Image: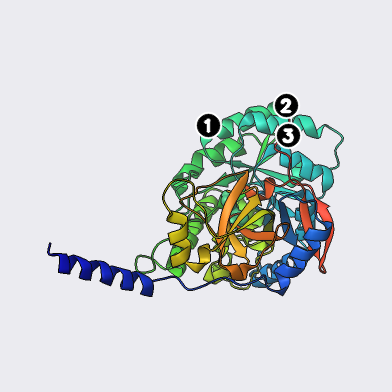
Amino acid sequence: MKRRHFLFGAGALAVGGWWLRPDNRGAAHNAYFQSLNDTLKQHGPGRPLMLIDRQRLIGNCRALVQMLPSHCQLRIVAKSLPSVPLIQEVMTHTGSQRVMVFHQPFMNALVDAEPGADLLLGKPMPIQAARRFYTELGDTHPFKPDQQLQWLIDSPTRLEQYLTLAREQNRQLNINIEIDVGLHRGGLTDPQQLDAMIELIEAHPEQLRFSGFMGYDAHVGKLPAFIQSAEEGHRETEAIYQRYIDRLYQLNPAYQQQTLCFNGAGSPTVALYDNTTVVNELSAGSCLVKASDFDLPLLKDFQPAAFIAAPVLKQLDGLALPGPLPLGELWQGWDSNRRRTYFIYGGYWKAEPVSPPGIQANPVYGVSTNQMMYNGSPDTALQVDDQLFFRPTQSEFVLLQFGDLAVWDNRALADWWPPLSQGNGA
Ligand SMILES: Cc1ncc(COP(=O)(O)O)c(C=O)c1O
C-alpha cells in the first residue's frame, strides 16, 4: 500500500472514531436514589443489601388485582417472592390466600406462619420431599393439607408414588394434574392421557381426589411477532386447555358440579387473560417486584420495587488497567463514561446497574463477586461510602443472596424481612 493511502486511511479511522465517541451518559442519582443513598450512608449496615420498596410493592399488588378477570382468583408465586413476610404483605394487599409453592422447606415455613394459606405445587415434588412435608407438619398442625394443599402430578408413575404415600399417611391427597399447553416442560401432552389417571384416582377415593389442572404458558409472547403474536399464542393455549377440560367432563360429568382449580398464567402473560378465559385461577409473583426481565409492554402498569444497593469502597479518577499498554488512558480519552472507576462491595449478581445513570461494568478488567469494578463519567459523582444501585434481572434467586431484605417505606428503612431458608439437614 502506498504511504499516502495508508496515512489517509489511518486519518479517516481517527476522525470516524472521534465521531463515534459515546455520549456522556453520566448523571448524579435522581431524588429517589439520592434519598436511599443518604439513608444507607448514615444508617445502613455498610454491606450490599436487597431493598424492597414497600409502597411500590403495594401499588403493584393493586395493579395486579385490577387486571384479573372477574371469575379468576389470584395465586401468589412464592418462588419469585422468597420471603414469608414479603408473601404476607402481598397476601394483605391482594386479598389472596392462595400460594404456588416450589420448595419443601418453604412450604413448611409458610404454613407455620400462615396456617390459613391454600397451597398448589408449581412443580412435581419428589416423593421424599412430599413425605418430609408431612413429617415436619406433624398431626396437630392447624394447616389441614387434605383441604388446603394440592400436589402437582405430571405422570401416571408419579401418581402411583403419591397413592403409596397416601396409604402410608392414611390421608386423602388432592391431585392437580400438570398439562402441557405449549411450553413443553413436561406434564400431559394429550387429553387422552387423562383417562388412565382419572381412572386410578377414582378407584382410590379414600386416598386420592382430583382437584384440577395446572397449565403454565411461559412460552407465550417469546416468539418474534411475525411468527406468532402473544395474543395468538394465548388463544392457542386457551384452546389446548379447553380440550383437557372437555375430556375430563366426558370422562365424568360430575366434575362439572365440583369446585376445581384450573390454574394458568404467570407474570409475563397474566395481562392476556380476560373474561373469556377457561381457567379460573391465575398465578403471578415476579411482576410484583418487577425485576428487569419483566420490563415487558404487557406489564407497563408495574413499577420496579426491588433494588440492590452496594457501597462504593474505592473511587479512582480515570481508568487504570493492568499491563504495559496505555489501554485505560486511551479508552477513557475516547469514552467519557470510563473516566471514573468505582470498586464496590460485592458484585457479579444477576443484576444491571441502574443508578447513577451511565454506570457500566468493565469487560476488559473482568468480574468479581468480592470487589467488582464499575466505570462512569465524572458526572456520576459518587464518593466512597455512596451507593451504587442495581436492578436484579430476576427475583427468585437474587432475593436470596443478601440476608434479610431491607424494607424501604416512606423514605426510611422500616423493616427487615428474612428470606426463605433453603433447608437444613435431616
Ligand atoms: C408453574 C408456574 N406458574 C407460574 C409461574 C410464574 O411466576 P412469575 O409470575 O413469578 O413469573 C411460574 C414461574 O416459573 C411457574 O413455574
Which of the 4 quarters of the picture holds residue 273?
A: bottom right
Query: Disc 1 marks which residue?
Result: 157
Secondary structure of the residue carrying tag 1 is helix
Say which mark, if any, is on residue 133.
3
Residue identifier under label 2: 425
| Mark 1 C-beta closer than 8 Å to ligand 1 | no
Q: Is residue 29 above or below residue 100?
A: below
Q: CA distance from mark 1 to mark 2?
A: 28 Å
The disc labelled 3 sits on which kind of residue? Phe
Residue at x 12%, y 64% (from the top left corner): 2
Of tags 3 and 2, the one toward the viewer is 2
Q: Kindly identify the amino acid type of the residue bearing the numbered disc 1.
A: Thr
Marks 3 and 1, the one that precedes in the sequence: 3
Percent x, y of residue 17: 35, 69
Classify mark 3: residues with Cα within 10 Å, few (<14), some (14-19) or many (20+).
Answer: some
In space, the residues marked 3 and 2 are separated at their CA atoms by 14 Å
Rendered location of residue 349, percent (x, y):
59, 49
